[in-house]
Image (spheres, helix red, strand yellow):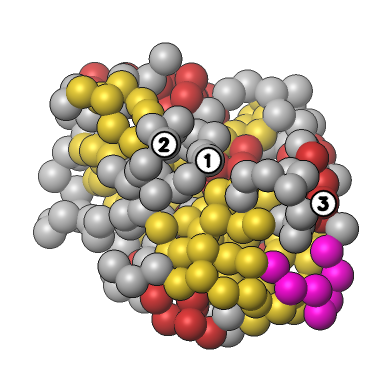
Amino acid sequence: MEKIQNKFRVVANEKLCPRFYRLSLDAKSLVKAIKPGQFIHIRVKDSLEPFFRRPFSVYRANKTADIFYEAIGPGTKILSEKKKGDELDILGPLGNSFSLPPKGTKTVVMVAGGIGVAPFLIFSDSLKNKGYDLILLYGARTKGHTFNMKDFKKNGCKVYVATDDGSVGVKGRVSQLFSKIPLDPKTTFLYTCGPNPMMAAVQAFAKENNLAGQASCEEVMACALGACLGCSIETTGGYKTVCYDGPVFDLQEVKFH
């Protein structure tokens, strides 16, 4: 896979809700190359501080390459201050991508927690109008962590939301929404991304009901090229790097801690 490193111009940097942002880049070469589930590595500032790039799942790749992020640390706070016309140094696309649902699949269920919803809009873009029943189960902490999901709904997704405090949707963790998942192993396929405890719950539910799926893992990355081993995780096949071997793994392969 050819990687692109270039500076791309910011087209928009929109605040979607109190916690989350959507940044759009004029990056036609990336748009053509990106596959659902892959990520890009962004140098947020042309200086030694912060030193490392930041990884971001690609949220959408249509006319622009978009990322979805939370301004929670020094790097993402710098990113949230970027204006239209600013340039960002980008490396990507990186990592592997989601596999298409296996033959016979009728229902595709995407289970996301917080910022873990990031890779699923581009994925739903690739699945719309292909005859699947698309379901998105989204878990958030509070109302401030929820946003207008009209783009998912336009793609035909049935969206269900749970918040820890009950301020939007069902009160509790996203596991409270598992009743929305059809339990036919031959026709239902799962995809998940979010905090490890949430994905562990999805994994356990899938194993109990003999459902197959994939998990997109999130880890802090330094090189994003598989060299530093800083994003290594434990799997049934030994330790693997999220940036190079992943970020997408078989749902039952990862040992969530």
Nearer the observer, 50 or 93: 50
Label 2 vs 3, first from the N-terminus: 3
Q: Secondary structure at mark 3?
A: helix
Q: How many marks?
A: 3
Q: Mark 1 against mark 3, which lies toward the viewer?
A: 1
Query: Which residue is denoted by mark 3 in the rendering?
Result: 78
- The reply to whether dot 1 and dot 2 touch (C-beta < 8 Å) is yes
Residue 228 is tagged as 2
Q: Mark 2 against mark 3, which lies toward the viewer?
A: 2
Q: CA distance from mark 1 to mark 3?
A: 18 Å
Residue 222 is tagged as 1
Q: Is residue 199 left or right of residue 152?
A: left
- Tag 2: amino acid: Cys
User: Of helix, strand and loop, which mostly describes the magenta segment?
Assistant: loop
Residue neighbourhood size for the residue with mark 3, other residues' Cα within 10 Å, grouped as few (<14), some (14–19), many (≥20): few
The residue under the point 28% across, 43% down is: 245
